[in-house]
């Protein structure tokens, strides 16, 4: 009996890269795993399993992380409300957006918006983006102020 390979097949890796690149480009558009899988000529289940194997998280989790990264940048700018930012990054539910934002960043978007503009003042945006990148594959510490 042969065992399944522990890594995605080379052809799958190329398709997975295209899926990830599409998510990076079109994060603000309505994207779902079924549509991504159909365009990659894979089943939704196979795409999800192989994507997790290759990148350490599901396609949906990767999409939400990308949206939260962009939301953080928009909130740091300070000229949009949390609701406007939620819809600008492609989320259709303010509740889901706020919950996921809090899980990844450690504070709700409204708190982040209020405090982030002050904490990154005078720092070039490219540096601020790296310093404030959300935590992937685990929840933020309960007390985010310990990181400061």
Image: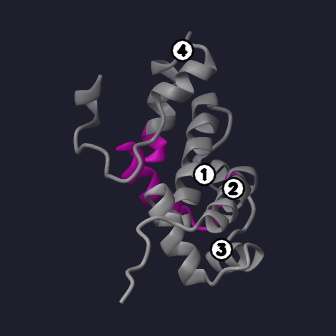
Q: Residue at x 29, y 22 (%)?
A: 148
Residue, disc 4: 121
Residue 71 position in % (x across, y down):
60, 44
Front residue of 83 and 1: 1
Residue 85 position in % (x across, y down):
64, 48
Q: Residue at x 31, y 45 (%)?
A: 140
Which circle's residue, 3 or 2, is located before the other in the chain?
2
Residue 84 position in % (x across, y down):
67, 50
Which circle's residue, 1 or 3, is located before the other in the chain?
3
Is the image coloured rainbow, by chain, by secondary structure, or in one colour?
one colour
Q: CB atoms at circles 2 and 1 under 8 Å apart?
A: yes
Residue 67 marker? 1
Q: Is residue 9 above or below residue 124?
A: below
Which circle's residue, 4 or 1, is located before the other in the chain?
1
Residue 27 marker? 2
Q: In the drawing, does residue 90 fall left or right of residue 5?
A: right
Q: Secondary structure at mark 1?
A: helix
Snapshot quadrant of residue 20: bottom right
Q: Is residue 75 above or below residue 87?
A: above
Determine if residue 19 is in view.
Answer: yes
Q: Main secondary structure of the magenta part?
A: helix
Q: Residue furthest top?
A: 122
Q: Residue at x 55, y 48 (%)?
A: 68
Give the residues in magenta.
89-111
Front residue of 124 and 109: 124
Which circle's residue, 4 or 2, is located before the other in the chain?
2
C-alpha gap between disc 4 and disc 2: 27 Å
Front residue of 126 and 144: 126
C-alpha gap between disc 3 and disc 2: 11 Å
1 or 3: mark nearer the eye:
3
4 or 1: mark nearer the eye:
1
C-alpha gap between disc 1 and disc 3: 14 Å
């Amino acid at each position: 009996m042969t065992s399944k390979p522990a890594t995605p097949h080379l052809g799958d890796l190329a398709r997975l890269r295209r899926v990830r690149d599409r998510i990076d480009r079109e994060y603000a558009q309505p994207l779902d795993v079924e549509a991504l899988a159909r365009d990659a000529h894979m089943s939704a289940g196979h795409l999800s399993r192989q994507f997790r194997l290759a990148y350490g998280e599901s396609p949906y989790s990767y999409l939400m992380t990308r949206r939260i990264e962009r939301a953080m940048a928009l909130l740091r700018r300070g000229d949009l409300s949390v609701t406007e930012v939620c819809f600008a990054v492609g989320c259709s539910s303010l509740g889901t957006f706020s919950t996921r934002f809090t899980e990844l960043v450690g504070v709700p978007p409204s708190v982040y918006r209020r405090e982030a503009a002050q904490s990154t003042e005078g720092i070039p945006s490219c540096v601020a983006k790296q310093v404030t990148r959300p935590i992937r594959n685990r929840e933020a510490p309960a007390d985010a102020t310990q990181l400061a």
